[in-house]
Image (tube, grey):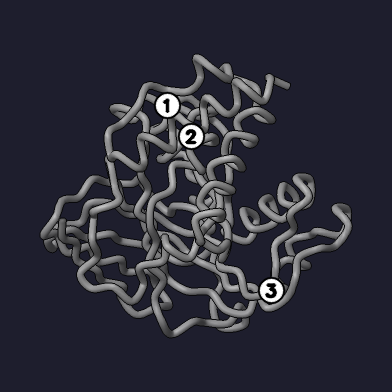
Amino acid sequence: MLSQEVVQAAVERLARARETRHPCPPVRDLIGTDDLAAAYAVQRGLVERRLAAGARVVGRKIGATSKAVQDQLGVDQPDFGYLLDDMDVSDDDPVSMATLVQPRVEAEVAFVLARDVDLPEEELTVEAVRGCVEVALPALEIVDSRIADWDIGFTDTVADNASSGLYVVGRGGRSLAELEPRDVEMELRIGGAVRSSGTGAACLGDPLLALRWLAVQAQRFGDPLRAGQVVLSGALGPFVPFAAGDEVVASISGFAPLSVTFHQ
């Protein structure tokens, strides 16, 4: 494990980039390219900094779950980050881009948890995590990178809270008795043109498999998923850029379309 001084230097670099909206160099020069413990330590430092400023943890996000997004990012495995209450812009229309640096948007299935997911790891089956889900919802994640030109390796995106920005969840949740997440189909339109498409199976084979993966990781890191939390299970297709003034519409089968516009 790297020294706390090195971890803190990475935290400060990313925090300053977020606060000034000026992207910074990658942090892999500080923490290396394969030290996941160090990368998640930087992530925790960034989250703790925001909690100290008054934010609250309201859930988690899973990143790089689809092959399309892994190819876009140049990574080969998923990661996770934290959702904070000030990232939730579900009730904002239009959504301000004032806190964003280099945003992209992706469509996914979100889960709201009915109970804590704190079973022993050997009991964390797909059926067990399915039973912890209250409802599924359509979601848009506005991913972002504080690292210049999205020049990221795996430890860079992990450290940067899994390249998180903002998120929007729709209304009209469906129970998992009504909807099978693996079978959904998605189209993402910007200005009326289809810019991304995919299926539930593109998300680690099944968004519920992604949820199980997250539940295992959360247990291992000593911070299990909790009742009431929102989990963004991962992109169903490639993420795409957008600009102020754009209307983004996600159509995910089984849900009403989810629409949002953006402004500076």
Residue 116, placed above or below residue 241 = below
At mark 2, the secondary structure is helix
Residue under label 1, please give it. Answer: 152
Distance Cα–Cα, label 1 vs label 2 = 6 Å
> Mark 1 or 2 closer to N-term?
1
Foreground: 178 or 143? Answer: 143
Inspect the image, locate mark 1, and give the three-letter code of the amino acid beneath it: Ile
Q: Residue 205, percent across and down?
A: 58, 51
| Quadrant assignment, res 128 | bottom right
Q: Residue 77, percent across and down?
A: 58, 35
Q: Quadrant of the N terminus?
A: top right
* Image mark for residue 157: 2
Which residue corresponds to the image point at 74% horizontal and 54% vertical from the top-left? 223
| Quadrant assignment, res 188 | bottom left
**In the rendered structure, are the residues bearing label 1 and label 2 in contact, judged by CB atoms less than 8 Å apart?**
yes
257 on left or right of 171: left
Inspect the image, locate mark 2, and give the three-letter code of the amino acid beneath it: Thr
Rate crowding at label 3 as few (under 14), some (14 to 19) or many (20 or more) other CA atoms within 10 Å.
some
Which residue corresponds to the image point at 68% horizontal and 20% vertical from the top-left? 3
Residue 85, placed above or below residue 255 = above
Residue under label 3, please give it. Answer: 227
Which residue corresponds to the image point at 11% horizontal and 60% vertical from the top-left? 245
**In the rendered structure, are the residues bearing label 3 and label 1 in contact, judged by CB atoms less than 8 Å apart?**
no
Which residue corresponds to the image point at 34% horizontal and 80% vertical from the top-left? 256
> Mark 3 or 1 closer to N-term?
1
At mark 1, the secondary structure is loop
**In the rendered structure, are the residues bearing label 2 and label 3 in contact, judged by CB atoms less than 8 Å apart?**
no
Rate crowding at label 1 as few (under 14), some (14 to 19) or many (20 or more) other CA atoms within 10 Å.
many
Inspect the image, locate mark 3, and give the three-letter code of the amino acid beneath it: Ala
